[in-house]
Image: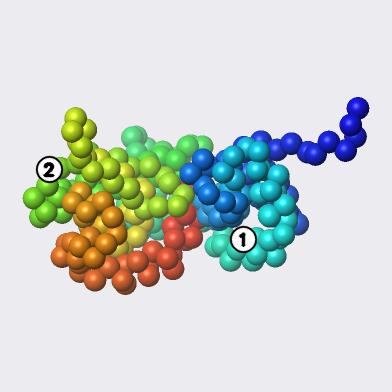
Amino acid sequence: MNLFRPQRYADGDQLDVRGCAVRLKVDGRARRISLRVDRAKSEVVALAPTPRRLSEAVAFAHEKADWIAGQLAALPNRQVIAPGGILRLLGKPYRLEVGPGRPKMTEDALIAPDDSAWGLRILRLAKREALTRLTERTAHHAAALGRPMPSVAIADPKARWGSCRPARPGHPAAIRYSWRLVLAPFEVADYVVAHECAHLIEANHGPRFWALCEQLSGDPAPHRRWLRAHAAELHAISA
């Protein structure tokens, strides 16, 4: 028996690097070993292009232990919503309340029954509002560009606010947004919608693409800065 056989690692394994959580992930699109911060889970992800290179990702994570600790320390504490609190949707404050009957959204409150799923029900209301409002703005910007309305969906991606699949023969265009955009100010969320709609024409980030973004929603720079500054806060909100 070989007592010195190297330890084997698998996609999804979790490491402890000086008390910090690091998760291993195989990404076939990756070209090299790298680290990224998963703000939603308050952990660092060590990426490897193939399962064979996971041991290299582990070694790299241990080499970067100080960097990992610094990144995680800089994350905001998880913000758990609770009755009596406030949740801003597109900049407007809504009271978070307990009430009988079906969960509902009023002019100034989000209300759900008092049970163990209260927080999840409140977030479902927020997600429903996100889909409604982002779909409305997508229709507005697509029409301004003279493009057919794409299908719209929401998800909870970790690293991007939106993605666009332009139309191709037999496949209509589709846009997917992070539901967390509804937690940002209206102007910021609308910029992301304009950004993805611009991809209906320009599937790149060249000068013509940025000209379309500015045509639809003005100077993108302040909105991009806001997202960089507040991304961790938006991902920290949970039930």
**What secondary structure is found at the residue carrying circle 2?**
loop
User: Left or right of 23: which side holds 88?
Assistant: left
* Residue 34 seen in render: yes
Q: Report x, y in % for residue 109.
A: 32, 52
Q: Residue 95 at x, y = what percent?
A: 36, 55
Nearer to me, 54 or 94? 54
Relative side of 156 to 74, left or right: left
Which amino acid is tagged 2?
A: Pro
* Callout in the foreground (1, 2): 2
Q: In which quarter of the view is residue 131 placed?
A: top left
Tell me the residue at 20%/49% (across/down): 200
Provide residue 196's location: percent of width, then percent of height: 26, 52
User: Disc 2 marks which residue?
Assistant: 148
Q: Which residue is drawn at 72% across and 59% down?
A: 63
When asked about the image quadrant of residue 100, the answer is top left
| Residue closer to the observer: 39 or 183 | 39
**Disc 1 marks which amino acid?**
Leu
Q: Whole-percent x and y of residue 81?
A: 47, 52
Above or below, 74 against 35 in this view is below
**Residue hosting label 1:** 72
Q: Is residue 233 left or right of residue 213?
A: right
